[in-house]
Image: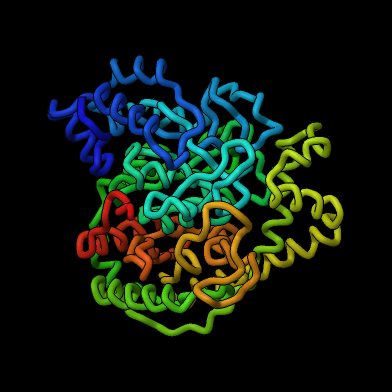
Amino acid sequence: MPDTPWTGDVVSLVDAFRAGDHTPTDELDATLAAVDASDLNAVCHIDAEAAHQAAATADVTKPFGGVPLAIKELLAVAGWPAAAGSVPLADRTFAEDSVSVRRLKAAGAVAAVQTTSSEFGGTNQTTTRLHGATRNPWNPERTPGGSSGGSAAGVAGGLFTLATASDGGGSIRIPAGFCGLYGLKSTYGRIPRGPGIILGNATSVEGSVSRSVRDSARFLDVTNGFDLGDPKSLPRVEGYEAGLGSHADEVGSLRVAVVVDLGCAVVGPETTELITGAAEELIALTGMRRVEIDLHLPNIMGAWGLTGTIGNRVTLGDRWPSAAADLTGAMRVGLERSEEHLDLDAMARAESRRVDLNNAMAAMFRDVDIVLAATNPAPAFDAEGWLPSVFEGVEAKSSNNGALTAPSNIFGNPAAALPVGLSSDGLPISLQILAPHHREDLLLDLSLAWERERPWPLLAARP
């Protein structure tokens, strides 16, 4: 048995299984031992018995054959806790697997552990009353982000190689950015979310946080495609992994704009400098044609947050309002404010704000093919406490958290978080790449070009 879990990416792990150099059971044992010894608080449930049974009979010829799978606690796995990071829901369990979990299992993945999320996936800090604070493996005093914080902390911290994530306002890209991972948010509906999904403000997509571009491409290959359980899901697309690196001619003809703050956020000065430099390097590397645009996206965070509470209210059911005192502060305040202010007029204003954002995003993509921006306004902030309102010495509203990522959720276009360097205090900085609807292939090829030229650490360098 190896002393530690696999330190490479998922694809190389599967290759090792197929070559007979490693076994799924050994990898599972190493994973469970690492989870047990970890101080990151990235895992909230372990299904060791079922995982050992699956690992013992794993078909390593499949895309994820024998790979221990970590599943974000918001994603349904039959018999696993369905608490959504919330104390009032701690007695619930899922009745059936979600579509993407079924597809991952069919592709050979071994469902092993459940990862922590912020409550209802509502903030980009993974700290709840139910599970406590999840820690960033680059610096345990900092947050791994949220809501997919446990998944990102575990992959970057060396606990497991394959983890699901989801992104309703940045919850794949934000933790990927804070933890030095690759995070792809696909086009809305690319990966089904059924069965029984709550649409809420209709922004959330399923996905993963990964150590490599090819891992994310393989994940997309396995999980994408229409399912009746999600009436908003899209037809299947083949060949994301097989097509990696095959779009060089098209990439070289792309028009690209660099707008670090997207015209709607406050980005710290050090982050701005690092993102600007990385963007210029990526443009030179790929041959894209840079153009200047005057971009001023409306800040959507208020409307996004207000309408997002609808799903939380449905999830709580008749536990609200008696459960209010057991919720984390942000979720309680959000629900109370929505009850007070979310009437027809407020919904109309929120919908008007959505229309304004969609129009601005459409105009942006008429002028350019690709936009490069920051993923986060600054490096990872504290693991506990309220969300910050100061970013590298610059003041902004707390809604600035997520302001860079939410526009692509509202509009529904794909976007990726790409590790491009470290801040002066040794924390990851992430470049965000925005592409038009259905062009995940362009995001993957741009990311691959960077990865080949500027490979990033697959695991966190802990102080």
Determine the image quadrant of residue 8.
top left
Instruction: Identify the residue shown where x is 35% and y is 45%.
Output: 157
Q: As displayed, is residue 115 above or below residue 111?
A: below
Residue 224 shows up from this direction = no
Instruction: Identify the residue shown where x is 48% and y is 65%.
Output: 376
Q: Horizontally, is 343 left or right of 7 in the view? A: right
Q: How is the image coloured?
A: rainbow
Q: As displayed, is residue 1 above or below residue 211?
A: above
Q: Nearer the viewer, residue 269 or 72?
A: 269
- Identify the image quadrant of the N terminus: top left
Q: Horizontally, is 410 left or right of 243 in the view? A: right
Q: As displayed, is residue 179 above or below residue 207?
A: below
Image x and y of residue 443, in percent: 36, 60
Q: Horizontally, is 316 left or right of 448 in the view? A: right
Image x and y of residue 382, in percent: 52, 57
Q: Nearer the viewer, residue 420 or 410?
A: 420
- Identify the image quadrant of the C terminus: bottom left
Residue 329 shows up from this direction = yes
Q: Nearer the viewer, residue 244 or 114?
A: 114
Instruction: Identify the residue shown where x is 23% and y is 36%.
Output: 13
Instruction: Identify the residue shown where x is 31% and y is 45%.
Output: 215
Q: How many marks?
A: 0
Q: Nearer the viewer, residue 204 or 249?
A: 204
Image x and y of residue 45, in percent: 50, 28
Determine the image quadrant of residue 440.
bottom left
Image x and y of residue 198, in percent: 66, 40
